[in-house]
Amino acid sequence: MKGWIFLAALLSANSAVTAGVENITVYQNPNCGCCSGWSDYMKSSGFNVTTIKTADVASHKVRLGVPEKLSSCHTAILATSGQIIEGHVPIAAVKKLLAMPEIEGVSAPGMPINSPGMGALDGNLVTVDFKGRKFSRD
């Protein structure tokens, strides 16, 4: 009986830990190392990342409503909110996005060298929302 109680407590504790994990799906080119670097960065930041490698990332950007002028090399969608993360957006901006459900998505346009997956953050990376307004500086 004690064994069953212990097992139930262990499973319950494990469920409580995984319940707070945010799931994210990343669409990326199969040959892009910097996209994989960003996905690894998100995993190390506590996200459960599903990567979909596709040669047609552009169709996913269109389907998800990423503004063309804010495009980057990969596109991600947050499972719980449906919000979009375009490119090498840092974790601080992703957490801010999660706290603001009225924001459709954010982008680090292009492939900035001072961004996760590309290089070290230096305090000068500007992330914008999908209306092109400054969202964060990391």
Image: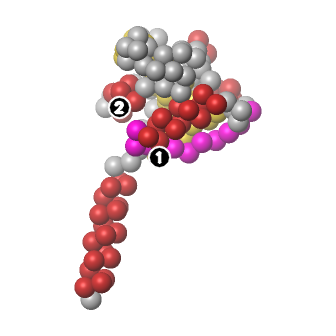
Q: Nearer the viewer, residue 2 or 69?
A: 2
Magenta-colored stretch includes residue 121: no
Where in the figure is residue 78, as x and y percent of width and height?
47, 38
Query: Which residue does the image show at 27% across and 89% down from the upper left?
Result: 1
Task: Give the farthest residue toward the bottom.
Answer: 1
Q: Which of 96 and 66 is in front in this view?
A: 96
Tell me where residue 63 sits by quadrant.
Answer: top right
Pointers 2 and 1 in contact (C-beta within 8 Å): no
Q: Does 32 sit above or below residue 49?
A: above
Secondary structure of the residue carrying tag 2 is helix
Q: How far apart are marks 2 and 1 (CA)?
A: 14 Å
Left or right of residue 126: residue 118: right
Residue occupying image coordinates x 38% and y 25%: 93
Task: State the mark number for residue 95.
Answer: 2
Residue 63 visible in the displayed image: no
User: Where residue 33 sits: x, y (%)?
Assistant: 64, 31
Q: Earlier in the sequence, mark 2 or mark 1?
A: 1
- Residue drawn 26% across the image and 80% down it: 5
The residue that disc 1 covers is 48
Give the side of residue 62 with respect to residue 82, left or right. Answer: right
Outermost front residue: 120
The C terminus, quarter of image: top left
Residues in magenta, as a range: 45-55
Q: How crowded is mark 1: few (under 14 residues within 10 Å), some or many (20 or more)?
A: some
Q: Which amino acid does label 2 sit on?
A: Lys
Residue 5 shows in the view: yes
Q: What residue type is labelled 1?
A: Asn
x%, y% of residue 12? 30, 67
